[in-house]
Amino acid sequence: MAGISFFSDMVQSITDRGRRLVAVGARSEPVQAETNIETLCDMLLSSRGEASGMALAAEVLQRWAQLDAAGQQDFVRMLHEQFGPDIAKLDKAIERYRSDRSSDAVIELHQAAEPRRQELVRRLNLAPKGTARLVEMRERLLAMKDATEPFRAVDADFAHLFGSWFNRGFLTLRPIDWSTPADILEKIIRYEAVHEIAGWEELRRRLAPADRRCFAFFHPRLADDPLIFVEVALTRAIPSAIADVLDVNRSPITAQDATTAVFYSISNCQDGLRGISFGNFLIKQVVEDLRRDLPGLKTFVTLSPVPGFAGWLARLRKAADASLDDQALKTLELLDDPNWADNPQKARLVEAVLLPLAARYFIRERATGRRPVDPVARFHLGNGARLERLNFLADRSAKAMRQSHGLMVNYFYKLDDIEANHEALAQRGEIAASPEVRKLAATASTDTDIAAPVRRRRTEMQKT
């Protein structure tokens, strides 16, 4: 940390000296207030001096931060219109490549096709805290929700550059515990996106006990700001409800007594890095670290939300899908009562219809490119996990009831099968799932009585 602080201080010092050297035209004086931001960007691209370049980059980022929403949208359009590729050079490079397929022609074409704004963003990164400012800039860009060509093109440039800058090789994994500096712990509370942390006492319960772990990825240019973190519970069994993990009255166990590691919350921290994947590396490295430190751990699972399920089910009901008979549709009307889960009889009726539909949702429904329709499922199944178990009313929080009617699932990371599961999904679109989930899904898609599989399962359990 001391080395990072020294580097930041050095960059700031060079930038301050550069401000005194920056000139507008032939006048050796600081940048004039009336110099517009487009001119400053042109000056930055033509700058050759390190100090003056840092000063110009800092000035551009400062001006950008002062723009209102409309001004920031105009800035994005300006990047698209004024800092795209040099069309004359690109046409020339294309003509050369058509007649000369040499490596030199390919290099020339590649260089000519790169928009000037990519180099501009690289130079803006030289400013003090430039990386953090650029991540914030992309966050604002994404918040604009503008699907027009200028916004798509500029966002593609940011995503391209961030994909290199935030490559796994630059990231460091750090444990987060009760002794972690308070400013980072405050961010863990703020960034938690799955199960809200109400305050410091609740955070202590998640970090301090011997059977709890938390790990985060950090980038050297964002040293005190996590990119993504995962919370882990060490247990003796696979939990079927989040209350089993977060119960304030539970009795902690020693880490050495645990046989199961449960990944129960994964939170991305930087909206400006959306689409830049860290989670797959995070899970795999945490598994390796836990296995090394705690050889008694044999099972690695998640307890995961299902954020897209309620929306999908609502669309199914509205369309009166052929797989839903009149009785199933009538049962699902119980979901319209906000207190349905408090009534045991209603809950049993809903469970009988809901679980087979949930199995179908995971196994059969697909988004673009044969990927699972649920975003959390895409992540874990794409990592090579197996869909292990569906847990009815596993999360009774208002958010979970709204997003998934309380449903949660366990994804099982069986280390010997991860690569095969990943390849089956990537190459053939096959979902790795337990026999129980597969049976539910198959029955839901063929039976007219959609509640039959759950009733059969209950009967079998009663006999045993």
Image (cartoon, rainbow, N blue to C red):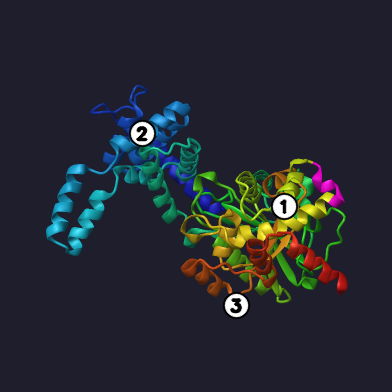
The CA span between labels 1 and 3 is: 40 Å
Closer to us: 248 or 33: 248
| Location of residue 210 in the rendering, given as x and y in whole percent from the top left corner | 78, 63
| Location of residue 247 in the rendering, given as x and y in whole percent from the top left corner | 83, 54
Is residue 21 located in the magenta-colored stretch of the structure? Answer: no
- Which numbered disc, 1 or 2, marks the residue closer to the eye? 1
Magenta residues, as a range?
A: 339-345
Identify the residue position indicated by label 2 in the image. Answer: 77
Q: Which mark, residue 416?
A: 3
Q: Amino acid at mark 1?
A: Ala
Quarter where residue 416 is shown? bottom right
Reading the chain from its start, which is encountered first: label 1 or label 3? 1
Whether residue 406 can be seen here:
no
Reading the chain from its start, which is encountered first: label 2 or label 3? 2
Closer to us: 163 or 462: 462
Classify 37 as above or below 302: above
Q: Is residue 250 left or right of residue 120?
A: right
Closer to us: 308 or 380: 308
| Outermost residue toward the left in this view | 99
Q: Is residue 322 left or right of residue 273?
A: right
- Which numbered disc, 1 or 3, marks the residue closer to the eye? 1
Is residue 341 located in the magenta-colored stretch of the structure? Answer: yes
The residue at 77%/45% (across/down) is 334
Q: Amino acid at mark 2?
A: Arg
Reading the chain from its start, which is encountered first: label 1 or label 2? 2
Q: Is residue 221 left or right of residue 29?
A: right
Which SS class for mark 3?
loop
The residue at 79%/63% (across/down) is 455
Closer to us: 268 or 7: 268
Identify the residue position indicated by label 1 in the image. Answer: 328
